[in-house]
Image (cartoon, grey):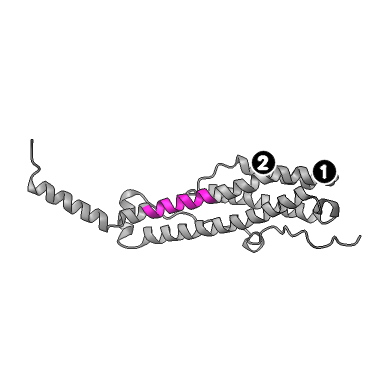
Amino acid sequence: MRIPSLSRLLAAALLVSVLSGCGYNDIQSADEATKSSWSEVLNQYQRRADLIPNLVNTVKGYAKQEKDVLLGVTEARAKVGQVKVDPSDPASLKQFEQAQGNVGSALSRLMVIVENYPQLKSDANFRDLQAQLEGTENRIAVARKRYIDAIQGYNVLVRRFPVNLTAMVFGYEARPQFTVENEREVSRAPSVNFDSKPAAK
């Protein structure tokens, strides 16, 4: 059995100490945190997408004449399903954000027309969907905030000296942040409050 030389043992010990102090492990942790946070963002958007068919069908039962709005919601949901998102690619992320914003806008328009149908607002199935949608919008906001925080932590880490040297060696770069084109409009979750009385005609 061949015993490693003292110089090899010293070199291995030096390599371990350098790698442990260079931030490589911190980069791995931050990278995993961004992936986990992104998965939760996708999970919550999927939850909203899964609610849409039931919501549209319920509204359709009471408001068949609102075909344009119902079709708009359905089409927006379908377009989101066609987007293949890569959160590390700014163009792909922007396309995903735009598609999700379109879904939010379509849902907002749907909720506005519901005000004209008091019998729909009193339907137990619709009220359950309303509560689920409201909860999902809140979950989306929380998931996005956690993702934004994870990306910020990762980006600060890979830009900070001396960890930035390790990041360059191993090919880790700063990642694009989750933003919206019209932050003032989209930062407000779609209104899903149906407790107010419909406007007088």
Residue nearest the viewer, comparing 34 with 130: 130
Q: Does residue 117 appear in this view?
A: no
Amino acid on which the number 1 mark rests in the picture: Gly
Highlighted magenta segment, given as a residue range: 29-40
Residue nearest the viewer, comparing 126 with 25: 126
Residue sitting at the far top: 1
For marks 1 and 2 on the same chain, the one whose residue lies earlier in the sequence: 1
Q: Residues within 10 Å of mark 1 (few under 14, many from 20)?
A: few
In the image, taking residue 119 as reference, residue 171 lies left or right, namely: left
User: Residue 78 has which mark?
Assistant: 2
Dominant SS type (magenta) = helix
User: Residue 61 has which mark?
Assistant: 1
- Of the two numbered discs 1 and 2 in the rendering, the one whose residue sits closer to the viewer: 1
| The C terminus - image quarter | bottom right
Task: Please tell me whether residue 145 is drawn above or below residue 92 in the rendered image.
Answer: below
In the image, taking residue 65 as reference, residue 124 lies left or right, namely: left
Residue at left 83%, top 47%? 66
Regarding mark 2 in the picture, which secondary structure is present there?
helix
